[in-house]
Amino acid sequence: MPTVRHVLSEKGRDVHHIRPDASVFDALKTMAEHRIGALVVLDDGHLAGIITERDYARKIALLGRTSPGTLVREIMSTRVICARQDQTVEECMAVMTAKAVRHLPVLEHKKVVGIVSIGDMVKSIIADQKFIIEQLEHYIQGGR
């Protein structure tokens, strides 16, 4: 089974982030520009939280607040579930399912070195299954 390290080597290690004192509007703008659903929140280079489209929907839109008038720190999730590079995709999917999260920042020595999404996990599993099927077909055909 592939690991988070493998997923990051395929998708890249870019981590889009924002400061906790930025406005939620700026966070949404950054997410839209990069076509992503979450931003890591860094305070002096340290992981302080994560802000997602789900946070916006539940803590701004449904409560009648405004995104320009609300700071990221007011709605970000501070209990961030993270992954390690040596974890398997299967382990991460189990955590994501159990904790109902769609994004896992990847830490190495307390530093964010990447982020993986549930979509990344599904893509990896599909690629792994495709490879296994191709190998089995090759074996059945006698290596021809």
Image (cartoon, rainbow, N blue to C red):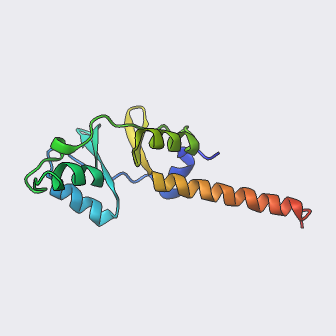
| Image quadrant in which you'd find residue 100 | top left
Relative to 32, is 92 on the left or the right?
right
Q: Residue furthest left?
A: 69
The quadrant of the rendering that contains the C terminus is bottom right
Q: Position of residue 52 (x, y in %)?
A: 29, 51
Residue depicted at 35% across the width and 59% down the height: 36
Residue depicted at 22% across the width and 59% down the height: 28
Relative to 126, is 134 on the left or the right?
right
Residue depicted at 39% across the width and 45% down the height: 101
| Image quadrant in which you'd find residue 68 | bottom left
Instruction: State the residue in front, 69 or 46.
Output: 69
Q: Position of residue 12 (x, y in %)?
A: 47, 55
Q: Position of residue 62 (x, y in %)?
A: 18, 54
Residue depicted at 65% across the width and 45% down the height: 1
* Observer able to see residue 20: no
Q: Residue furthest right?
A: 142
Q: Position of residue 61 (x, y in %)?
A: 17, 56
Instruction: State the residue in front, 58 or 4.
Output: 58
Q: Residue furthest top?
A: 109
Instruction: State the residue in front, 110 or 23.
Output: 23
How many numbered dots are placed on residues in this image?
A: 0
Relative to 4, is 104 on the left or the right?
left
* Observer able to see residue 108: yes
Q: Is residue 116 positioned above or below 34 on the image? A: above
